[in-house]
Image (cartoon, helix red, strand yellow):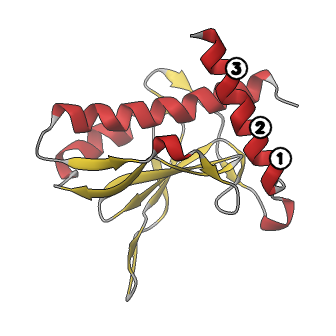
């Protein structure tokens, strides 16, 4: 069920979350609610391969993964402007969906993640909704990968 490629991408997703919170720890002028422990929501944002980073109101908030939306941060304060270029550079990020401002608020932009520092990642591709993994399957895969990683520690 879980293969090495899945585990590599799972670890990459967790690492992106760690990197984002490195900025929060270093810069006391910004705050971001830590939502990494919530796991994934398989109903949204599944990818066929790779990872996308989604922003809201100028801060990085979630990843689109093969198992669904992995919420990294929730509410926040302060400006990420001086950190975003560095973060996006570390992730080899390329904007794929521009910022959209509506009466409901700011959504995006969304960036394709091509690397984590010097470690290359597969080119991200969105999954068609009709091909989404079943909810329980995606949740159980995430739980199994987390357990495997926890056993290595």
Q: Are marks 2 and 3 in contact (CB under 8 Å)?
A: no
In the rendered image, which residue does mark 3 sit on?
A: 148
Element assignment for label 3: helix
Q: Position of residue 2 (x, y in %)?
A: 82, 29
Report which quarter residue 108 is drawn in.
bottom left
Which is nearer the eye, 39 or 46?
Answer: 39
Q: Position of residue 123 (x, y in %)?
A: 65, 41
Tell me the number on the disc at residue 141.
2
Q: Position of residue 134 (x, y in %)?
A: 84, 55
Q: Quadrant of the C terminus?
A: top right
Of marks 3 and 1, which one's residue comes earlier in the chain?
A: 1
Q: Residues within 10 Å of mark 3 (few under 14, many from 20)?
A: few
Q: Position of residue 48 (x, y in %)?
A: 75, 49
In the rendered image, which residue does mark 1 sit on?
A: 137
Element assignment for label 2: helix
Q: Quadrant of the N terminus?
A: top right
Question: Label 2, label 3: how many angstroms apart (C-alpha)?
Answer: 10 Å
């Amino acid at each position: 069920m879980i293969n090495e490629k899945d585990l590599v991408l799972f670890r990459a997703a967790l690492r992106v979350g760690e990197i984002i919170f490195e900025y929060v720890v270093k810069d006391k002028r910004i705050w971001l609610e830590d939502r990494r422990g919530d796991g994934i929501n398989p109903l949204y944002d599944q990818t066929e391969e790779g990872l996308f980073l989604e922003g809201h109101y100028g801060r990085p908030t979630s990843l689109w993964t093969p198992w669904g939306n992995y919420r990294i941060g929730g509410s926040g304060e302060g400006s990420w402007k001086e950190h975003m270029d560095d973060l996006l550079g570390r992730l080899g990020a390329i904007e794929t969906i521009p910022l959209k401002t509506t009466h409901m608020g700011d959504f995006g932009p969304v960036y394709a993640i091509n690397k984590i520092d010097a470690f290359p990642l597969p080119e991200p591709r969105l999954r068609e909704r009709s091909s989404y993994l079943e909810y329980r399957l995606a949740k159980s895969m995430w739980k199994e990968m987390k357990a495997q990683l926890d056993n290595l520690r």
